[in-house]
Amino acid sequence: MWIALGVVAAVVVGVALWWRFRDPLRGESFDQFEVNRLWGWELRLSEEEEIAFMAGLRAYDNEVGSFFIHGEHGVLSLYHPPMLISMHLMADRFKAMGPAAMSDPAGAVRHLFGQAAARESVGVLHLRENWLPCEIDGMDKYGFRDAMSDALSAPGVDGVEGGYGEEDSGYGMVVVLAGDTPESVQAMYDQASDLSTSEPIRDRLDVVKAVLEEPEPEYVEALNRADGEKSRYTNTLLVDYARVLDRYAATRTQMQGAKPSDVLGAALSRMLAEQAPGTTWTRQPSQEEQEFAMQIIATRVRY
């Protein structure tokens, strides 16, 4: 019976997340340069400053090179040259430029990208072109991504708020909340839950109904506000797959017979412990956040 209940519980969680992430581009109306005033990095700017900042980003995207903004994770992924940049860092640097940025947002953003390309720092992670030239240990880029996602997962550990892996550019990220969820944030989630009229999940038929039904707009809006408020307290660990790969062969010789994900986890754990190049955070991490990242890798379930 407990196995069946576990499966149902997993399905329920999947249903709860499916409608939120089934269309990551939000359909044809999605505009990554829209000013939402939602995420923590956005609120580091005034509304006027954010309007100018997003206009500068749009101009750069149109004229120079394409990128994607992971707004909820606070990360910008630039394709050429490949790198990850913290949106918190970008917002802070744009704000520090003052009137010059407001009068020429396109030029200001171009300058910010130049700064990021010049050197790595907290919030800037350079990636490698053609990061996986051939299969390793039977893994192509998709298998490596999946193994890295497994290495960065931590079933049953509270505080892992999300993650993402990208096989073409070769990077992964995990969003963490070290410590308890602030009471003010939990209250917002409770208020959002009160707005939902969804029936409780009792059987498979209820699961099907939940998948087919659209959630209430008021519930979605309230849930988004709660997610945005929580993002003020989270931090995102960024990982360059190529530099984990550089350590893979040496780590494998010490872990004969281990799953690739375990070998990758051990290599990444050493990188974090040594504070070696190849990882960074969207904000300067606290000691608690660094220790929590180590815990995620050390305590994840291995089969």
Image (cartoon, grey):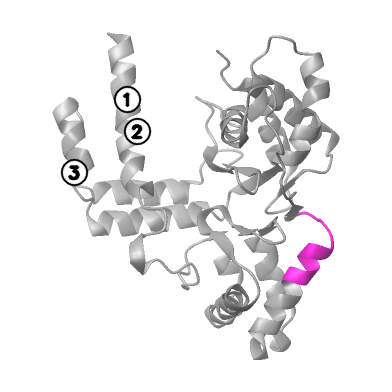
Residue type, numbered disc 3: Leu
- Give the residues drawn in magenta, as a range: 113-122
Disc 3, SS: helix
Residue 40 seen in this snapshot: no
Query: Residue 185 location, x and y as percent?
Result: 45, 50
Kindly report which numbered mark, 3 or 1, lies closer to the viewer in this rendering: 3
Q: Nearer the viewer, residue 43 or 215?
A: 215
Query: Residue 239 location, x and y as percent?
Result: 69, 42
Where does the C terminus fall, quadrant-wise?
top right
Q: Nearer the viewer, residue 140 or 42?
A: 140
Look at the numbered discs 1 and 2 and tell me whether their residues touch, using CB distance below 8 Å: yes
Residue type, numbered disc 2: Val
Residue 237 versus residue 78 in the image, above or below: above
Residue type, numbered disc 1: Ala
Residue topped by disc 3: 212
Label 3, label 2: how far apart the Cα atoms are: 15 Å
- Mark 3, Cα crowd under 10 Å, few <14 / some 14-19 / many 20+, is few
Residue 256 lies in quadrant = top right
Disc 1, SS: helix
Residue 122 versus residue 237 in the image, above or below: below
Relative to residue 279, is residue 230 drawn left or right? Answer: left
Residue topped by disc 2: 13
Residue 203 versus residue 4 in the image, above or below: below
Relative to residue 214, is residue 36 drawn left or right? Answer: right
Q: Residue at x 34, y 61 (%)?
A: 27
Q: Residue at x 21, y 31 (%)?
A: 201
Residue 296 seen in this snapshot: yes
Q: Is residue 97 magenta?
A: no
Label 3, label 1: how far apart the Cα atoms are: 18 Å
Residue topped by disc 1: 9
Residue 266 versus residue 281 in the image, above or below: above
